[in-house]
Amino acid sequence: MSLTPADYGALTSCIAGMESAVREMDAAKDAFGKARAIVECSSDTRKTILAICSVETVGTGDSNAVAETKARASHKYAQMMKAHKSELAQAEAVIAHYYMVKAKWETERSKGSAERAMVNL
């Protein structure tokens, strides 16, 4: 059986899809790394925000528990937490997009393997 270039069309398409996904993942690698760091450090960031807001009332003679309660009720704490939550949401979106592109690459690779088997390469 003689194979024609048309027989390789789907395989070529899969390779092009994989190349596109690799370029997209490469372009997003720095943002992905930063996003992972933001997510991984989120707990420490929240603790730091609380400490920053608590330290202002600890010096007034309040106990740590009272200072923490006042800090959590403060406008500054709310604003800092709102900014952190926004940054965290953006980071999670970047990570989700990266994994979606990676899944696209995996799908194209699987399709390519099936196409290769069908044309006996």
Image (spheres, rainbow, N blue to C red):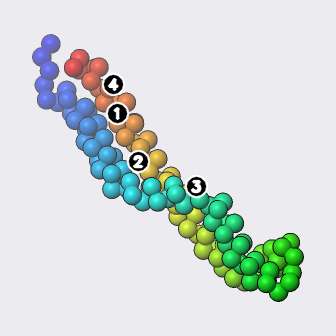
Disc 2 designates what residue? Answer: 101
For this rendering, which residue is in front, 48 or 42?
A: 48
Residue drawn 64% across the image and 76% down it: 80
Residue drawn 64% across the image and 62% down it: 44
- Of circles 3 and 4, which is in front? 3
For this rendering, which residue is in front, 37 or 28?
A: 37
Disc 1 to disc 2, C-alpha distance: 12 Å
- Of circles 2 and 4, which is in front? 2
Disc 3 to disc 2, C-alpha distance: 21 Å
Label 3 vs 4, first from the N-terminus: 3
> Mark 2: which amino acid?
Val
Disc 3 designates what residue? Answer: 40
> Mark 3: which amino acid?
Glu
55 left or right, relative to 61: left
Disc 1 designates what residue? Answer: 109
Crowding at mark 3 (Cα within 10 Å: few <14, some 14-19, many 20+): few
* Residue 114 circle label: 4
83 left or right, relative to 58: left
Disc 4 to disc 1, C-alpha distance: 9 Å
Helix, strand, or loop for circle 4? Answer: helix
- Whether residues under marks 2 and 4 lie with C-beta atoms below 8 angstroms apart, the answer is no
Helix, strand, or loop for circle 2? Answer: helix
Residue 114 lies, in percent from the top left, at 33, 24
Crowding at mark 1 (Cα within 10 Å: few <14, some 14-19, many 20+): some
- Whether residues under marks 4 and 1 lie with C-beta atoms below 8 angstroms apart, the answer is no
Label 3 vs 2, first from the N-terminus: 3
